[in-house]
C-alpha cells in the first residue's frame, strides 16, 4: 500500500528474469538408487503375478479389472472427456476419501486394449502411482497428481524419443515409469539375453523404454543386488543365481 511492497515485487520480477532458466532439453531424468530400482522391479513383478503368467503378454484391461477387485482402495473410471485438471491428458490418477481412482479417456483406453504400446505404458504408469505413492494421494477431498506429459501425446509424438526424455523430471515420475516398464515386461525376461527389440515386441512395451533398462540389467552389480535381496528372502533357487 505504501509502494514499498510494489518496489520489492518489481525487483523480484527483474531478478527472476535475469537468471538463466534451463530449457527442458537440459534437464536430465533423475536417477534411481540401485536398491530402489530393484525394489520397484520386484514390486512390479509381484503385482504382475496377480494378473498374468510370468512370460505372458499382459492384458491391461484384465489387469485393471483384477487389481480393482483385489485393492480395496483402487478403482478406475472411463470417461468420454477428461476433467479440466488433466489438461488434455488421457490417463491420470486422483486421490479421495475412499482411495485412488485411475481416470481414462475412453478413446485412448481402447487404443491400449488394442495393443498401442505408449497407451499401455500410460495405464501401467498410473497403476505405478497407486502402488508406489499412496502418501501423495491421501486426501479427504478429491485431489489430482499432475498427469505425466506422455499421457498427452498422440502416437506420432510418443514415438519421438527426445520428446519423451524431456518430460520425466521428478523422482516420482521416474519411479512410476520404471514400474510401468517392469509391469509390462518382467525383470526376469531380461535375464534370457533377448534383445530389447524383441522384448518390446513380445510384451507390448515401447522399445525405447526397454532399451533404457536393457544394458543396465546386464550389469553384474545390478544382478548381484537382485541376488542379495532374493537370498535374504530365502529364494535361493531363483534363475538369477544361475546366470
Image (cartoon, rainbow, N blue to C red):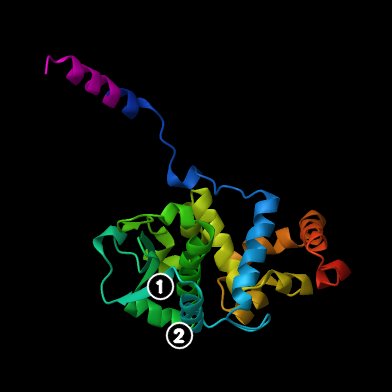
Which is nearer the eye, 171 or 211?
171
Q: Is residue 13 left or right of residue 179?
A: left
- Residue 205 higher or lower than 34, as above or below: below
- Residue 60 higher or lower than 40, as above or below: below
Image quarter (top left, top right, bottom left or bottom right) of the N terminus:
top left
Decide if residue 178 is in sight here: yes
What's the residue at 42%, 59% (across, down)?
148
Residue stretch in magenta:
1-13
- The residue pinned by badge 1 equals 75
Is residue 102 covered in magenta?
Answer: no
Secondary structure type for disc 2: loop
Residue 8: give its label. none
Instruction: Give the main secondary structure of the magenta stretch.
Output: helix
Which is nearer the eye, 156 or 149?
149
Give the farthest residue toward the left. 1
What's the residue at 36%, 62% (across, down)?
94
- Residue 161 higher or lower than 27, as above or below: below
What's the residue at 46%, 71% (across, down)?
72
What's the residue at 33%, 79% (across, down)?
107
The Cα–Cα distance between marks 2 and 1, rounded to whole angstroms, is 21 Å
Q: Position of residue 125 (x, y in %)?
A: 49, 65
Q: Position of residue 152 (x, y in %)?
A: 37, 64
Which is nearer the eye, 54 or 46?
46
Secondary structure type for disc 1: strand
Nearer to us: label 2 or label 1: 1
Q: Position of residue 207 (x, y in %)?
A: 59, 70
Callout 1: few (<14), some (14-19), or many (20+) C-alpha neighbours within 10 Å? some
- The residue pinned by badge 2 equals 114
- Pick whichever of labels 2 and 1 is earlier in the sequence: 1
Quadrant housing residue 228: bottom right
Amino acid at each position: 500500500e505504501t509502494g514499498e511492497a510494489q518496489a520489492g515485487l518489481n525487483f523480484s520480477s527483474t531478478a527472476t528474469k535475469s537468471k538463466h532458466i534451463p530449457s527442458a532439453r537440459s534437464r536430465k531424468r533423475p536417477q534411481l538408487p540401485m536398491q530402489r530400482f530393484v525394489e520397484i522391479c520386484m514390486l512390479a513383478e509381484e503385482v504382475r503375478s496377480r494378473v498374468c503368467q510370468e512370460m505372458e503378454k499382459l492384458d491391461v484391461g484384465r489387469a485393471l479389472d483384477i487389481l480393482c477387485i483385489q485393492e480395496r482402495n483402487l478403482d478406475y473410471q472411463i470417461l468420454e472427456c477428461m476433467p479440466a485438471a488433466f489438461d488434455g491428458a488421457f490417463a491420470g490418477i486422483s486421490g479421495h476419501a475412499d482411495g485412488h481412482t485411475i481416470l481414462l479417456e475412453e478413446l485412448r483406453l481402447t487404443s491400449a486394449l488394442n495393443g498401442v504400446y505408449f497407451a499401455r505404458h500410460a495405464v501401467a504408469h498410473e497403476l505405478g502411482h497407486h502402488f508406489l505413492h499412496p502418501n501423495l494421494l491421501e486426501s479427504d477431498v478429491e485431489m489430482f497428481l499432475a498427469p505425466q506429459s506422455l499421457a498427452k501425446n498422440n502416437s506420432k509424438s510418443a514415438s519421438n524419443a527426445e520428446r519423451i526424455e524431456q518430460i520425466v523430471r521428478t523422482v516420482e515420475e521416474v519411479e512410476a515409469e520404471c514400474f510401468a516398464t517392469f509391469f509390462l515386461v518382467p525383470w526376469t525376461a531380461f535375464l534370457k539375453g533377448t534383445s530389447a527389440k524383441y522384448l518390446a515386441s513380445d510384451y507390448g512395451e515401447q522399445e525405447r523404454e526397454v532399451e533404457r533398462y536393457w544394458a543396465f540389467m546386464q550389469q553384474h552389480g545390478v544382478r548381484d543386488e537382485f541376488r542379495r535381496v532374493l537370498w535374504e528372502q530365502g529364494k535361493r533357487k531363483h534363475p538369477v543365481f544361475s546366470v
